[in-house]
């Protein structure tokens, strides 16, 4: 079960709106992440050449291979947008998992699981009209688990690999994922299946490997504040990082953000700052301070003060 490109590691970074920008993807790469995705990008926004949207898909030279994830519901818009973008990435990924009401309203994201014929049509036209591989990242169902026939049809249409977030749309991000569902799909398909949902430690990774039989794994929320989780997986351990080490990672991340986001960097870094310090005692004061900081120097001083 081969992916359509070489990956140096079987551990992938999930697409996450508001988080998986160029600096964060670069940082995760440095910790050994094997494949990255842009956050979900509207096919409508790119159709009209929205500049802000182009910023979201920029990648570092080290960020290879890299998938651009598109959401929408009109097959023709997928094609025209994918044609514009396929030179900027290694794969076009279709979002069939987003539960956000504004995405469902336009019959996109996880709505495509309610109307699989629309999803099939999107895959069909993309496979016909673009040269780069096409993948699908999906929930295990909208309000009930997808039938195996849905996955088999995607395979027949030529999808290169599938990522399954093993929760229903109706579960949003809560509840234990159903890894048996992934196992069932993985056993039936010849294309690679990437397991996703709830992988937040090496211990958990071992469990998901055992339950799904998958070769490839995707980490979302746990990588925020713990980008070194990819290194932990490669070293087959759950490492305990010292606060000094965490502070070094925070500074490195902030420098990458400053290079990319310029004067917006510190404000955008705040949520990462909070995540890095999650679980450490007496951090409320520092979280408060960063919420009022705007310049790089202020942010560096605050990081230096953490003890
Ligand atoms: C803040 C946030 C933003 C997300 N944005 C996207 C997105 O743009 N595209 C997508 O396919 N999934 C998105 N997801 C879902 C994740 O990619 C992933 O499937 C989900 O979080 C389950 O994995 P995890 O338990 O490792 O976090 C997002 C999740 C979070 C928490």
Image: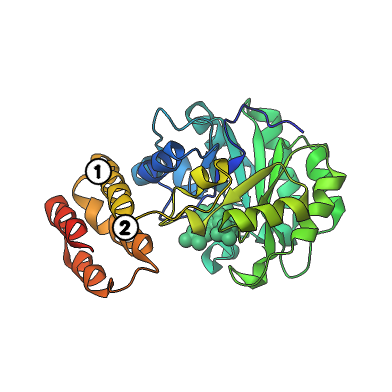
Nearest to N terminus: mark 2 or mark 1: 2
SS state under label 1: helix
User: Is residue 56 visible in this depiction of the protein?
Assistant: yes
Label 1: few (<14), some (14–19) or many (≥20) C-alpha neighbours in 10 Å = some
Query: Compared to 219, does 25 lie above or below?
Result: above
Front position in the image: 40 or 227: 227
| In this picture, residue 109 sits left or right of residue 290 | right
Residue at image position (42%, 29%) is 62
User: Is residue 53 visible in this depiction of the protein?
Assistant: no
Residue at image position (68%, 32%) is 3
Foreground label between 2 and 1: 2
- Residue 23 placement: quadrant: top left
Provide the residue designation for mark 2: 243
Query: Compared to 280, does 75 lie above or below?
Result: above
Provide the residue designation for mark 1: 255
Query: Compared to 38, does 240 lie above or below?
Result: below
Q: For the residues labelled 2 and 1, say whether their Cβ atoms are less than 8 Å apart.
A: no
Is the shortest distance between ligand 1 and the CB of mark 2 under 8 Å?
A: no
Front position in the image: 53 or 307: 307
Residue at image position (52%, 50%) is 15
- Residue 267 placement: quadrant: bottom left
**In what quadrant does ligand 1 lie?**
bottom right
Could you say where residue 270 lies in the image, as x and y percent from the top left? 29, 61
| In this picture, residue 21 sits left or right of residue 170 | left
Could you say where residue 24 lies in the image, as x and y percent from the top left? 39, 46
Label count reads 2
SS state under label 2: helix
| In this picture, residue 56 sits left or right of residue 136 | left
| C-alpha distance separating marks 2 and 1 | 18 Å
Query: Compared to 36, does 292 lie above or below?
Result: below
Q: Quadrant of the N terminus?
A: top right
């Amino acid at each position: 079960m081969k992916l359509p490109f070489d990956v140096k590691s079987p551990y992938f970074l999930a697409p996450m709106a508001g988080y998986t920008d160029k600096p964060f993807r670069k940082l995760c790469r440095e910790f050994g992440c094997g494949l990255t995705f842009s956050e979900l990008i509207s096919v409508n926004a790119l159709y009209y050449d929205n500049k802000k949207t182009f910023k979201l898909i920029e990648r570092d030279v080290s960020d290879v291979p890299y998938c651009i994830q598109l959401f929408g519901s009109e097959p023709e818009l997928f094609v025209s947008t994918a044609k514009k973008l396929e030179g900027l990435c290694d794969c076009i990924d279709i979002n069939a998992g987003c539960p956000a009401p504004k995405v469902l309203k336009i019959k996109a994201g996880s709505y495509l699981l309610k109307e699989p014929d629309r999803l099939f049509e999107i895959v069909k036209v993309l496979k016909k009209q673009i040269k780069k591989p096409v993948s699908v990242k999906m929930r295990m169902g909208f309000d009930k688990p997808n039938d195996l026939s849905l996955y088999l049809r995607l395979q027949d249409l030529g999808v290169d690999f599938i990522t399954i977030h093993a929760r229903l749309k109706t579960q949003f991000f809560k509840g234990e994922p159903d890894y048996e569902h992934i196992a069932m799909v993985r056993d039936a398909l010849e294309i690679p299946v990437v397991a996703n949902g709830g992988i937040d430690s090496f211990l958990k990774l071992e469990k998901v490997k055992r339950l799904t039989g998958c070769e490839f794994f995707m980490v979302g929320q746990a990588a925020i504040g713990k980008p070194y989780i990819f290194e932990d997986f490669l070293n087959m351990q759950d490492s305990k990082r010292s606060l000094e080490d965490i502070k070094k990672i925070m500074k490195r991340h902030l420098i990458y953000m400053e290079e990319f986001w310029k004067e917006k960097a510190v404000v955008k870094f705040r949520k990462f700052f909070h995540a890095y310090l999650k679980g450490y005692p007496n951090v409320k004061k520092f979280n408060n301070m960063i919420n009022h900081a705007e310049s790089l120097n202020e942010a560096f001083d605050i990081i230096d003060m953490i003890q």
